[in-house]
Image: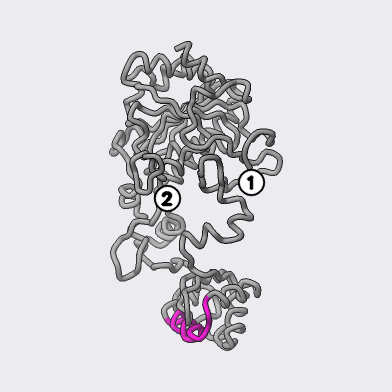
Amino acid sequence: MAGKGKPAGALAGIRVIDLSRILGGPYCGQVLGDHGADVLKIEPPQGDDTRSWGPPFRDGVASYYFGLNRNKRVMRLDLTTTEGREALVALLAEADVVVENFKTGTMEKWGLGYDTLAARFPRLVHCRVSGYGADGPLGGLAGYDAAIQALTGIMSVNGEADGGPLRVGLPVVDMVTGLNAVIGVLLALQERERSGRGQFVEAALYDAGLSLLHPHAANWFMNGKTPGRTGNAHPNIYPYDSVATGTDSVFLAVGNDRQFRILCEHLGAPALADDERYTTAGARSVNRVALKADLEALLRDHDGKSLADTLAAAGVPCVPVVSVADALEHPHTAHRGMVVEMENGYRGLGAPVKLGRTPATYRHAPLTPGEGFLASEGGFDWELAVQAG
């Protein structure tokens, strides 16, 4: 959904200044923008670092940047100068939210710390995305997705059982931190309706990494055993794993006894469901090595794609293991509106949250100049604010 004449988003009228760069903060700003907020992204004179994170590139700007900066107007200010900071303050005077992920102490050094801004703009919600928070044993250190995956135990449970710790193949900590920042901003805006006051919101990568440890943390809290790697298999239930067929692998996600019985019957081995090693979820989890061997012996004569379709129709969660390209080109991806196309050839991932009356809209492709964001478009006159600064 794009362009004029569309329903106003859930955050229409909320003005956001996005001072952040790289991933977590910009992802937060993009989500807010998708849902109607007026977002102005302030970049340093050289631009966000991710403009150079390629290939691929389009007109000298990397795809990485394009994936995180939709529904924003972009303006460059040098905040190391008095003039740049004065221009920012003029913008903040009309903003509801500021999102930043500078190293702890940077905003304070510039005279733009939370206490200073709160005194001047009491309704402003100040959202900081940080690595570890400002204090504590690791306070103030810079945070990076893969480093946080290593330090919070995520790598230790990712990978094959006989292999070494492995980074998750996407920046899951950064992205979840961005989503946590969105949640924090929305909570603060909701509370502001009662108090009339903004507040400081922090989303730290370290906290986000730890928050992702379910069920490994829950298991450790209960039995004290250090979790290990289980490859594609779930640590608690089985068969919840990728299994080989006569062609491509499929992923079985069997979560209860009924589904397991249907699976066995479909494979022509109903007696397997009555085997005492496999009759309960707990028994199947304990005896997973033998069960995987039994299942793959039954699956070796099946075509993976056909099997997945048939089992899913019968009520057994099963899907083929596909590439990123196949996933993005799947008909259901289009049906769910998860690929967005805009002017100048932009394509990106759609908003995953669907609202019935106020759906996400896609109004500004990345790199849209900030100076053109006029009040007549239903937004805030950022240009006049900058001139006032």
Tell which residue pokes out farthest to the top in this image.
Answer: 388
Residue 105 relative to residue 263: left or right:
left
Q: Tell me how far mark 2 sits from mark 1, CA to CA.
A: 21 Å
Q: Residue at x 32, y 59 (%)?
A: 166
Which mark identifies residue 13?
A: none
* Residue 129, position as x, y percentages in the image: 41, 35
Q: Residue at x 35, y 64 (%)?
A: 159
- In this view, 335 is above or below 13: below
Q: Quadrant of the N terminus?
A: top right
Disc with the residue nearer the chain's start (2 vs 1): 2
Residue at the disc numbered 1: 354
Q: Which element type, helix, strand or loop, lies under badge 2?
A: helix
Q: Mark 2–mark 1 contact, CB under 8 Å?
A: no
Q: Main secondary structure of the magenta part?
A: helix
User: Is residue 200 something one can see in this rendering?
Assistant: no
Q: Which element type, helix, strand or loop, lies under badge 1?
A: loop
Foreground of the two, 207 or 33: 33
Q: Residue at x 45, y 57 (%)?
A: 218
Question: Could you tell me the amino acid type at mark 2?
Answer: Val
Residue at the disc numbered 2: 172
Q: Residue at x 58, y 27 (%)?
A: 14
> How packed is label 2: few (under 14 Cα within 10 Å), some, or many (20 or more)?
some
* Residue 311, position as x, y percentages in the image: 60, 75
- In this view, 255 is above or below 355: below
> Which numbered mark, 2 or 1, is in the foreground of this view?
1
Q: Is residue 276 magenta?
A: no
Numbered range of the magenta stretch: 290-304
Which quadrant of the view contains residue 163?
bottom left
Residue 356 relative to residue 365: left or right:
right
